[in-house]
Each structure stands twice: as structure tokens, then as C-alpha cells.
Amino acid sequence: MGNSISSPAGRVPLDLKSPVPSDIDVAQSVKPIAIQEIATSVGVLESELELHGRAKAKVDLSVIDRLKDNTHGHYVVVGGITPTPLGEGKSTTTVGLSQALGAVLGKKVVTCIRQPSQGPTFGIKGGAAGGGYSQVIPMEEFNLHMTGDIHAITAANNLLAAAIDARMFHEATQQDEPLFNRLCPADKTGKRSFAQNMFPRLKKLGIDKTDPDALTPEEKLKFSRLNFDPAKITWRRVMDTNDRFMRVITVGQGPAEKGHTRETGFDIAVASEIMAVLALATSLKDLRARLGAMTVATSTVDEAITADDLGIGGALTVLMKDALMPTMMQSLEGTPVLVHAGPFANIAHGNSSIVADQIALKLVGADGYVITEAGFGSDIGLEKFCNIKCRYSGLAPSCAVIVATVRALKMHGGGPPVVAGKQLDHAYTSENIDLVTAGAVNLTQHIENTLKYNIPVVVAINKFATDTDAELEAVKKAAIGAGAHDAVLCEHHAKGGKGAEELGKAVQAACEKSAADKAEFKFLYPLKKTIKEKIEAIAKEVYRADSVEYLPEAEAKIELYTKQGFADLPICMAKTQYSFSHDATKK
């Protein structure tokens, strides 16, 4: 049956059907509003847009300067409990909340989310546009090439990989003087000069000379030889495809490479450090500095070798300049969405870009809302959102939403394994309050973790058709008991923004209370602590470990990174998303 709901003027009315059709059918049933209209509705000028078809456009960073005097809106981060392999609808909740605030409650809102990788899109997990009647559209364009940012990252990453192997080859096959002369070739008059991209390395070496011929033999040697340790090259090639046979490869097998082979491999494109850098950059200048500072290997004397040592930081920036602009799209109900960057949360920091959030906060103004999503649970994406992203952006969240499901809590309470592609066990489709109550400890720990940052928490309980009222009430009771500001049942998958209206009201109330209380955002640890102290702060405070065991390889890495000057950086922990522990099977 069909049921139309009314939307504010200019929005897209949803024709709700039950049962909910497939995501692709829902997405294609709604014609997107011209993206210029979406942009104009939130205050973006036509001159600040770079159109990519009718339904998406890049937004120029100049909007931040134009609106520099605007007061920021409320900043809401959406996290979740520890998920099942099926996911608990965090992206769907993020979009549904946006539709509720904008299309139902009439608030100015912008959603900031990550661009999905084609790896999961073509795998079991699928896309990341949301689902049901809470989606970003056009869904196909969102989930595939979009505006080419991931392709730009792939090109930049692999250019750097090629530069590493080429430099190693030339250093291995040439004497000192010819190597220097190739780096600084003489012109027709016999005069040598440094290229602009060489000055960062000269500065690092403490050489302030601008004439190559003025360098001493020792300075020439230091400048021209990076002395890679082949066993300590950390930079790999990437592609945005799950191609397992490319994970470990041997390069240099052609006759022109003269036997200089080494083992390396391909990662998924969004796992490139360039993706993580893109999300943390605050301007083109900052992007240039971050790209040049990326460590790609360690030398034979344990010195960090960077992209700028290879003289390639500028070239990487040129390839990435357009990718620095977020892409504007829209939800099914016409609320604006900024899609930008897509680092994974279980290995990288798992959050969309700082610049997208900055633009959105300026656009919505003091009474508006910016909804951003952190990957996986509070132990991963939200922890990194607070301790990494907010530390570099200088932004502080007004409220956190934690998405929970009865299904996931049953699994954490001792239910049978949930396996993607297999039918759910009977325990998940029939009432079992004991399992829900037992698994609620997972929700409690996520709430307690988030409260440590002094952020009010609203729990969004994603309702499934098989959930009973008693089970849902048990989740709500556990959430309030753990200190949540509120816990709300959500049906945005089936009802769009209307199904998240109460969530929107709860988020408004939490944000207003946070502002009235002048709550001061807190980090989990100060940067001045040692690497081990920061690791232990995360492990003990977030994962609830009793202690941390350091294997010899970890001890060696900590010693090396401290020696290389990286001890004052925040910690980005790689861990499983399926457990608070290091073991995915432990619930």
C-alpha cells in the first residue's frame, strides 16, 4: 500500500510503501532536485559550485572564508555499538536524522558522510548511501565513481610508489657523482639549479645553499642518497577493488630493472594514507604540507624517508587539488549532503573530512545542525573522531548519537554467530529479553566511553520488524540507566524523516542542554604523553583492558617512531570492529 507524507516547501514528498522496496527501487523512485537548488537553499553561491552533472557538485573551500563570521551550528556525531557483520544501520540513521531535522522539523541541516569504497560496494557489505527511505541519491553515483576523488587518491598513491622504486633503482645502479648530476642536471650553459620541489629536503638536511655546485661532497651525498632499507618500506600500491591475488606481489621482474626485485603488494585505495590525509587537511596549504610529510620508508640508519625527500609532495598535491573540495548531493527528502573522503575506521581514523564539516557548520548558522558519521562503534570511529579529528579541526561536538539494535545486543548477550549471507538464527527473530539484557553491557560501555569526552548521548534504537515492545523497552531502560540523555525508537528506514522525528527532537534537546551547560569537550589523553601511555589510555579507558602486552616487534616500532620524532602525535589504533577486544570472536 502507498502513503504520502507532507514535506516542507521545496522538499521531495515521499511515497511510502509497505513492505519497503529494495534500496535501489526506492532511490530510483525519487527524482533528485537540481543540485544548484539544494546548494542555494543552504547558502552556497553558484560561483562556489563546480557541477558534475545535474545531481552533484563540488563545493569550493572559499565558502569558508566568505562565511568566516558566521556562528557555527550544532555539531552532532553519529556512532554506534559494536556491530554485527550485517551492520546496524548507522549510515541510514545519519541520513534519517538529517531528513527528520530538515524535512520534518524545518531546521537548517547538512549531513557530512564518507564516500564508500568500491571494495565493500561490490562485496558482501554493499554500498553506504543508507537504506530504505533514508538514503543519499543518486545512490548509484554515490556508491561508484562519484566525482573521482578515490581515483585521484589512487593516482597520487601509485605515483609515489613508482617514485620510491625508481629512486631505489637509481641509487643502487649509479655512483655518487652521476646520481647527483642526474638529480640536478646542467642546462645548456652548464649551470645547475635545484628544482623547487628539492628545497624541503635541503631544509631538512640543514643546507641553506641554493646553488648545487656550492654543496660540499658530503652535502651532495646526503642530498642525493636516501638509502632506503628495503625491509622497512611501508608504502604500497593501491586499487579500489577487492583483488586478493594482488595483496602480495613481486615488482622489478622486467629485464630493464636488472634483477632489482622486491616483494610488495596492493591495498584497497581508501586505505592509502593519502585518504587519511585528505580527511584531516584544513586547506590546500595544509594538504601540501601533510602530503609532503608522509613517511614512506625508513633508511638504513633509521631515518624517516618522506614524500618531500623524494621531491614529490607538490606533484601529489596537484593530483589531489580537486579532491580537496567536498561533493554536495542530497537525501531522498532534499536535505543537503556533503560527501567527502572515506578512510576506514578499523585501520585509519574512519571519519569524513574536516573541510566538509567546516563548510557545513558555516552554512547552517547558529540554529542549524551538522550531522557527521564516525565509522563502526564508539571504540573505533568515535574515539578517533574525538582524539584525532577534533584535535586537528578545533571543533567540538554538541551531541553524540549511538545507534543500537536488538539484534546486535542479542549477539553480544550470547546469541549464535551472525554471518553475512546466512539466514538469522531463530534467537534473533523471536522474543528473548534475557539475551537483550545480557548484551546491553555492550551498549552501556559505548555510552560510558562517549560520556568521557563530556558529550551528551542520545541512543537511536533502530527498530526491526521482529523486535518486540518488551525487547525495545529493555534497550531503552539500559541506555537511560547507563547515562544517556535519551533513548528513542527509530523507523526512518520504513518512514523516512518522519520515522526519526522523535530522534530529531531528542538531538535538539541534547544540543540545547549542552550549549546551556557550556559543556567543555575533553580529549582522552594529552599529546605530550608517551606512545605507550597513549596506547594504554585507549586500551584501558575504551576497551577496558587490564593491561597492554607489547610484543618485540611493537617495542621496536615504538622505539623507532620515538627516535624519528613521532611520539607527540595522537594514536590511530588498528583493531577489529567486531569486539571491544583484539579478538573478533569475543563479545
Image: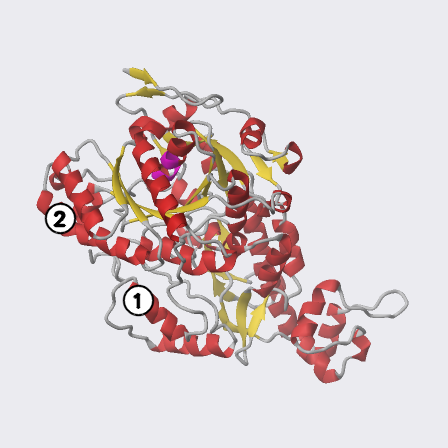
Q: Does 451 lie within the magenta span?
A: no
Find disc 1 in the rendering and name its residue: 539
In which quadrant will I find the N terminus? top left
Task: Specify start and end residues of the magenta stretch as a single range.
Answer: 93-97
Figure quadrant of residue 464: top left
* Tag of residue 326: none
User: Relative to the observer, which residue lies in front, 375 or 127?
Assistant: 375
Question: Which class describes the residues within 10 Å of circle 1: few (<14), some (14-19), or many (20+)?
Answer: many
> Is any part of residue 54 visible from this angle?
no
Q: What residue do we see at 33% from left, 21% from top?
A: 16
For badge 2, the amino acid type reads Thr
> Is any part of residue 284 visible from this angle?
yes
For badge 1, the amino acid type reads Ala
User: Relative to the observer, which residue lies in front, 55 or 455?
Assistant: 455
Find disc 2 in the rendering and name its residue: 437
Q: What residue do we see at 47% from left, 51% from top?
A: 270
Residue 193 in picture, x, y percent from top left: 80, 68
Tell me which label, 2 or 1, sits earlier in the chain. Answer: 2
Q: CA distance from mark 2 to mark 1?
A: 25 Å
Q: What residue do we see at 43% from left, 27% from top?
A: 333
Figure quadrant of residue 143: top left
- Residues tagged 2 and 1 counted as in contact (Cβ below 8 A): no
Label 1: which secondary element: helix
Q: Is residue 407 above or below residue 235?
A: above
Residue 538 in picture, x, y percent from top left: 33, 65
